Amino acid sequence: HWAGVAASATGDQGARAYLRRHAGDVALVECGDVAEAYDIDTEADLAHLE
């Protein structure tokens, strides 16, 4: 699946369209214990996380 995700993940939409097309293959995982969640869309976002 990763090649399809990478090919469709662009801009602020990320892989949203891919995930919607493959909704039956998606498993939701509870992650309430995550310290801080970040949306990484740009190099600047990634630099902030590093």
Image (cartoon, helix red, strand yellow):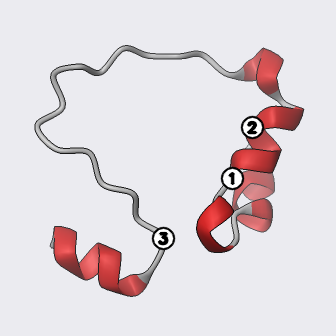
Label 1 to label 3, Cα distance in Å?
A: 11 Å
Q: Which amino acid type is marked by label 1?
A: Ala
Q: Residue furthest right?
A: 21
Residue drawn at (26%, 45%), measured in percent from left and top? 37
Do tag 3 and tag 2 residues touch (Cβ < 8 Å)?
no
Q: Which amino acid type is marked by label 3?
A: Asp
Of labels 1 and 3, earlier in sequence is 1
Q: Which amino acid type is marked by label 2?
A: Leu
Vertical placement of residue 47 versus 26, above or below: below
Of labels 3 and 2, earlier in sequence is 2
Query: Which residue does the numbered mark 3 point to in the structure image?
Result: 41
Q: Quadrant of residue 12?
A: bottom right
Q: Quadrant of residue 34?
A: top left
Considering depth in this image, is 4 or 12 the residue closer to the camera? 12
Residue drawn at (23%, 19%), measured in percent from left and top? 32
In the rendered image, residue 19, in percent from the top left (x then y), is placed at 74, 37
Q: SS of the residue at dot 1?
A: loop
Residue drawn at (16%, 44%), measured in percent from left and top? 36
Label 1 to label 2, Cα distance in Å?
A: 6 Å
In the rendered image, residue 41, in percent from the top left (x then y), is placed at 48, 70
Query: Which residue does the numbered mark 2 point to in the structure image?
Result: 19
Vertical placement of residue 38 versus 46, above or below: above
Q: Residue furthest bottom?
A: 44
Q: SS of the residue at dot 3?
A: loop
In the rendered image, residue 25, in percent from the top left (x then y), is placed at 76, 20
Q: Residue furthest front?
A: 12
Q: SS of the residue at dot 2?
A: helix
Do tag 1 and tag 2 residues touch (Cβ < 8 Å)?
yes
Query: Which residue does the numbered mark 1 point to in the structure image?
Result: 15
